[in-house]
Image: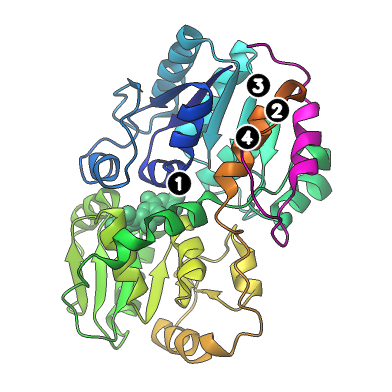
Amino acid sequence: MRVVTVAGTRPELIKLAPLIPLLDARFEHVYLFTGQHYSPSMVQVFLDELDARAPDRWLDVGSSDPEALTVATRDALADIAPDVILAYGDTNSTLAAGIGAEELGIPLFHIEAGIRSFDRSMPEEVNRVRVDAIAALRLAPTGLATWFLTAFEGYDAVSCPAVGNLVVDAWRRHRPLIDARPAPALAAPYAVLTMHRQATVDDPEVFARALAELARVDMPILFPVHPRTTARLEAFGLEWPENIVVSEPLGYLDFCRAMSGAAVLLTDSGGVQEEAISLDIPCVTLRPNTERMETVFLGANRLFDLARDTDLAGVAARAIAEHDARPYRLNPFGDGRAAERIVALLEMLGGGETTVTFQDAPGIVGLEALRAAAATLGRRDG
Ligand code: UDP
C-alpha cells in the first residue's frame, strides 16, 4: 500500500516526526512537504534535531497562499498516486492535501480531526471543518473531538476514533534530548511566550494592548518570535517592552527545555497549550476561545481575551498559584501511542492484522474500534 504524508509547517514537522519512521517501516511511504514554511529556523532545524528524515518531495511553494498550495499539492499527489493520504491539523497545507484528495478520489485520513473553537473568524477553524468534511476517516485527538464530530456535524462515530494526540508521542520520544539541553539564561521565575495568530498580531490595537499587558507581568518573558509577529511589529511601529527577552524561533528541543523550566506559558499557539498540560506547566491562552477546551476543564489552562480582558499579570499569578491544587492530573491527549494507533489502523485496512502493540488508555480507543474504523473503508490492494 502506498501512503503519502503531507506536511507544510513547523507544528506538522514536529507532531508527525514520531509517525514517519513507523510508516517508513511498514508501507511504501512518501513524505511530501509543501514548503508553506520555508525559513531554516521554521523547517530545517526540526529535520536536523528530531531524528526525522528529510521529506521525499519538497514543493517549495514558499507561502501560505491557499491557491498556490492547492495546485502544487494536488499535482504532486496525482503524480504519486497513493492509496491513502495522511494530513495533520488545520493549516493551508492540510486543506491543500484535503482538496487534492477530494479531486483525485483518494481516501484522506485527517489527523487531529474534530477539534473546534466554534469561531469561524479563525482561518484554522474553517480549514478544520472543511478537511473533516472531505476525510474518509477523522482521527480525533480526544473523546471530546469525537463528540463534536458526531453530535454537531453528524459523522458516524465509527469513522471518528479518538487515537490520542501526536504531541504527546513527540514530547515523550524526545524527552531525554530535551532534558539534556541547557536551560535558558534567565533567572527563575520566568514566563515563555508565543504569539503569532492573525487575531493577535494583525490588528495594531490588539497587538499594542497585548504588549501593554505583557509589560505588567512581573517577571522576564522569553519570547522566541515567529517571523509573522516580527513583520507585524515592524509594520505597526511597535516596540517590545523591557521585560520581554526576544530571540529567534528556537528548535523544538530548546523550546521544550525552556517551557519545562517556566513558571507559566503565555500563548496563542495550539500546540503549546497541549504541551503545557503534557509538561505540567500552567498556561494562559491569549485568545477569547480555544479548540483545546479539555485543558481549560481540567484547570490547566485559562483564557485571556487580548481585545477585552485586563490584568494579565493577575491571571498569570492565579494560574501559577492554583495549578497544583487541580483535582485531576490526567493528560487528555493520551498516552503517547497515537502514532502506533494510526499505523495499526492503516495495517488493518482490508481486514489485515496489525504488527504494533499498545495498552488501552483512558478515553482513547482500543484495537477493536480501530478495526471497525478500518472496515468502513473496505479492501485496499497492495
Ligand atoms: N515551537 C518551537 N520553537 C519555538 C516556538 C514553538 O519548536 O520557538 C514549537 C512548539 O513546541 C509547538 C509548535 O512549535 O510544538 C507550535 O507551533 P506554532 O505555534 O507555529 O503552531 P500552532 O501549534 O499554533 O499551530
The circle on residue 136 is 2
* Residue carrying label 4: 355
* Residue carrying label 1: 15
Q: Is residue 126 visible?
A: no
4 vs 1, front mark: 4
Per the model, the C-alpha gap separating discs 3 and 2 is 5 Å
The residue located at (22%, 54%) in the rendering is 230
3 or 2: tag closer to the N-terminus: 3
Q: Mark 4 is on which residue type?
A: Thr
Figure quarter occupied by ligand 1 = bottom left
Q: Give neighbour class at mark 4: few <14, some 14-19, many 20+ (Cα, 10 Å).
A: few
Q: Quadrant of the N terminus?
A: top right
- Secondary element under disc 3, as helix, strand or loop, is loop
3 or 4: tag closer to the N-terminus: 3
Q: Give neighbour class at mark 3: few <14, some 14-19, many 20+ (Cα, 10 Å).
A: some
Q: Mark 3 is on which residue type?
A: Pro
User: Which segment did they paint magenta?
Assistant: 355-382
Per the model, the C-alpha gap separating discs 3 and 4 is 22 Å
Residue 278's x, y, as percent? 50, 67
